[in-house]
Image (cartoon, rainbow, N blue to C red):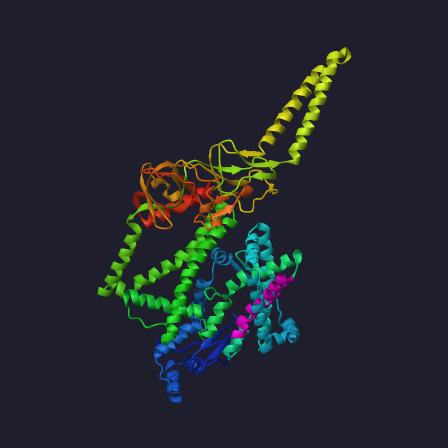
């Protein structure tokens, strides 16, 4: 900008009001009604803005120097002019300025595809103007914002947590039961209910301090509707404590709801009402509060941290400062920081920014996977790729583009070459094959073992004890079934009737014509009786070989009703041992028969092994319950049909035996198998796993 140039005028609809003190210096809040947003100005910016009507940079600088102790430069005028233009605070007085502003807005305006990409996961719709309702209802809830009200909410929260801790086992067990489809739907409804009062809490707190609440609506967060409340007017407040009350009012409301629901759950008898109180309590405590209290996303915790630090626009300013610091550390371009921060604050901002980047990386990757599973496969793959590009890869590419334009990168010196060397080492660590082994969860067990299952449903009338030694052919579990007994009695009656009819036809010449039909009915009744008696025989579970019975479910008792194919235990033969491991699909091609391996037990002891068998098909149901996540094992599983454990990812069973006999055992020891394999780079491992996932999910 030339110092002889005239500055474009400010928009006439802007309003300026005093802001809070920041580090002992006054601030001002500039309100833009067209965008319904506030801009916080420092002392120098205010002095420049208040003299903007002079239009000439030299006149503004002279007036500031004559009337204040500040000594700004032309660069300060240029900086503020760029800021004002970028924020849309200036008028266009000439055709050239109009064209320039139009071009800038055209660049900022997102196309339909870009808008859809950025908004299909979070879309806000304005529904009502709640200002009059909040004003009318405020007298009824004002007491909640008094000291006594806050103490009362805190007391209820502590009492609720105490009551939950007294019955913690039942509370957590009920929470696990909520992982069903019906439970998740109930929890989603409860969260939506709590969100309504959460947003009303923000609205009432905003009205408490005389600010407007112009709109309330619904936001679709990953296609799930939640309420939102516009509390932008709170930027008018100069008292930081008042803004903190507004920031935390939603969570305080949810604490009150969670506390009341938790106390009701603790005192009510079993029934639908108690179940409803539990769903409301658990969803509010564990999900809503945990999400809102985190400062790493722009929820309540973010604004609380921003006001606690007295650092408006925390994300934009924090990210800009951390990117500048990262460039200085890596390449030393000696560029001035976007702003000068005091020593304690700059460390907090950098730690927050880096933590937020890491958190959001995994969050957006998780959302990409969620979007993939929420849609049909072709659309899911496209949306997942778009999500990863726009929210993960694109910011990284843009930052690398900024690096390439740095003068110390274009003409690298000793420091930059050192950074290049470090980056090259990291790149080689990712690309060079170095990992020459495959680690897999494994179990040392007897070579001969059999899962004992009920072939027919019935009532358990006899069972062996845990760790009982049994002989071949011994009855281990016996059940009875009223249904099967009835079928046997009915089949016998039908057989006797058919046989009587057949005999009668033999001695009665008039009935000989029906004798052939009687023969058929006799044959059918005999077959039905044989089937029923065979089912009755299946009510007895016998030992196919001698061994020891283990892993009987702890809640299995005589008199219990047994379902068909229900797991009753495991029969283990103590003649020889084997190691059973489960290898991921990405590592399967590296496993060779005869490859050397080691079994590392939890206590650190090792056994030398070799691979003797590799499965050609993935494991559909995990029978080694010790390795399942439901039993605190390392393999993630989910409940499948008939209570089977289905692995979340494709796994292949690998059997290993000792280079020397492993001896006999009836115990089952969990550990890790380390198999010697051709080396593979980290990049190759990630690539193969991604391709395997894509091929598996893309298959019909």
Q: Please, is residue 372 above or below residue 234 in the view?
A: above
Residue 653: x and y in percent read: 41, 40
Residue 243: x and y in percent read: 52, 75
The single residue placed furthest to the bottom in the displayed view is: 66
Which quarter of the rendering shows the N terminus? bottom left
Q: Does the segment drawn in magenta span residue 255?
A: yes
Residue 413 visible somewhere in the drawing: no
Residue 228: x and y in percent read: 56, 65
Residue nearer the viewer, 663 or 368? 663
Residue nearer the viewer, 103 or 485? 485
Q: Please, is residue 106 above or below residue 92 in the view?
A: above
The single residue placed furthest to the right in the displayed view is: 510
Residue 490 visible somewhere in the drawing: yes
Picture quadrant where residue 444 is located: top left
Picture quadrant where residue 507 is located: top right
Residue 134: x and y in percent read: 63, 72
Residue nearer the viewer, 25 or 64? 25
Magenta span dominant secondary structure: helix
Which residue is found at the position 51% from the left and 65% from the top?
A: 292
Q: Please, is residue 185 above or below residue 611 in the view?
A: below
Q: The magenta stretch spans which residues?
A: 244-267
Instruction: Give the tally of numbered discs.
Output: 0
> On the rendered structure, is 641 left or right of 529?
left
Residue nearer the viewer, 115 or 588? 588
Q: Does the segment drawn in magenta span residue 91?
A: no
The single residue placed furthest to the top in the displayed view is: 509
Which residue is found at the position 38% from the left and 80% from the top?
A: 57
Which residue is found at the position 56% from the left and 47% from the top?
A: 555
Picture quadrant where residue 346 is located: bottom left
The single residue placed furthest to the left in the displayed view is: 414
């Amino acid at each position: 900008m030339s110092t002889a140039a005239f500055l474009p005028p400010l928009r006439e609809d802007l309003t300026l009001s005093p802001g809070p003190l920041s580090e002992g210096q006054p601030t001002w809040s500039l309100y833009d009604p067209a965008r319904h947003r506030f801009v916080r100005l420092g002392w120098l910016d205010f002095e420049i803005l208040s003299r903007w009507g002079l239009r000439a940079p030299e006149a503004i600088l002279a007036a500031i120097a004559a009337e204040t102790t500040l000594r700004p430069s032309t660069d300060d005028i240029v900086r503020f002019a760029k800021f004002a233009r970028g924020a849309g605070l200036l008028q266009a007085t000439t055709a050239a300025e109009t064209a320039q502003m139009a071009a800038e807005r055209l660049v900022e305006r997102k196309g339909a595809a870009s808008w859809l990409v950025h908004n299909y996961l979070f879309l806000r719709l304005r529904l009502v103007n709640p200002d009059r309702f909040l004003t009318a209802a405020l007298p009824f809830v004002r007491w909640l914002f008094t000291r006594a009200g806050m103490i009362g909410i805190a007391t209820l929260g502590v009492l609720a947590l105490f009551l939950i801790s007294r019955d913690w086992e039942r509370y957590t067990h009920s929470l696990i039961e909520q992982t069903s489809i019906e439970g998740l739907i109930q929890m989603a409804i409860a969260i939506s209910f709590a969100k309504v009062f959460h947003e009303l809490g923000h609205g009432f707190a905003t009205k408490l301090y005389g600010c407007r609440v112009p709109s309330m609506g619904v936001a679709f967060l990953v296609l799930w509707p939640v309420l939102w409340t516009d509390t932008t007017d709170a930027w008018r407040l100069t008292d930081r404590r008042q803004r903190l009350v507004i920031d935390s009012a939603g969570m305080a409301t949810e604490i009150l709801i969670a506390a009341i629901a938790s106390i009701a759950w603790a005192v009510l008898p079993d029934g639908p009402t108690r179940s409803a109180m539990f769903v409301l309590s658990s969803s509010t405590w564990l999900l809503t509060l945990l999400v809102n209290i985190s400062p790493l996303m722009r929820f309540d915790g973010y604004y609380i941290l921003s006001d606690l630090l007295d650092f408006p626009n925390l994300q934009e300013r924090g990210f800009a400062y951390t990117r500048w610091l990262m460039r200085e550390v890596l390449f030393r371009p000696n560029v001035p920081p976007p702003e000068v921060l005091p020593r304690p604050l700059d460390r907090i901002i950098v730690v927050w920014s880096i933590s937020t980047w890491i958190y959001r990386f995994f969050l957006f990757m998780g959302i990409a996977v969620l979007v993939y599973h929420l849609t049909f496969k072709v659309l899911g793959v496209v949306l997942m790729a778009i999500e990863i590009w726009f929210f993960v890869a694109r910011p990284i590419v843009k930052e690398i583009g900024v690096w390439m334009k740095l003068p110390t990168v274009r003409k690298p010196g000793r420091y930059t070459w050192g950074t290049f060397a470090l980056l090259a080492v990291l790149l080689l660590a990712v690309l060079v094959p170095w990992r020459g082994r495959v680690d897999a969860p494994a179990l040392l067990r007897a070579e001969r073992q059999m899962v004992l299952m009920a072939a027919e449903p019935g009532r358990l009338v006899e069972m062996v004890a845990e760790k009982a030694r049994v002989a071949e052919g011994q009855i281990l579990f016996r059940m009875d079934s009223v249904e099967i007994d009835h079928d046997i009695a009915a089949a016998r009656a039908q057989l006797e009737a058919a046989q009587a009819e057949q005999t009668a036809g033999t001695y009665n010449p008039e009935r000989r014509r029906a004798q052939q039909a009687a023969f058929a009915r006799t044959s059918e009744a005999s077959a039905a009786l044989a089937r029923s008696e065979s089912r009755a025989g299946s009510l007895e579970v016998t030992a196919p070989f001698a061994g020891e019975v283990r892993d009987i479910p702890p809640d299995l008792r005589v008199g219990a009703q047994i379902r068909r194919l229900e797991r009753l235990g495991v029969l283990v033969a103590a003649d020889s041992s084997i190691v059973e491991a489960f290898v991921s699909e990405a590592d399967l091609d590296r496993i060779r028969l005869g490859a050397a391996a080691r079994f590392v037990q939890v206590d650190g002891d090792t056994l030398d092994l070799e691979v003797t068998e590799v499965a050609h098909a993935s494991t559909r149901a995990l029978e080694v319950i010790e390795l399942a996540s439901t039993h605190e094992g390392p393999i993630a599983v989910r409940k499948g049909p008939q209570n089977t454990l289905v692995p979340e990812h494709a796994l292949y069973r690998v059997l290993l035996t000792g280079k020397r006999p492993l001896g006999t055992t009836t115990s089952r020891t969990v550990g890790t198998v380390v198999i010697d394999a051709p080396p593979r780079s980290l990049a190759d491992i990630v690539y193969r796993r991604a391709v395997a996932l894509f091929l598996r999910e893309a298959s019909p």
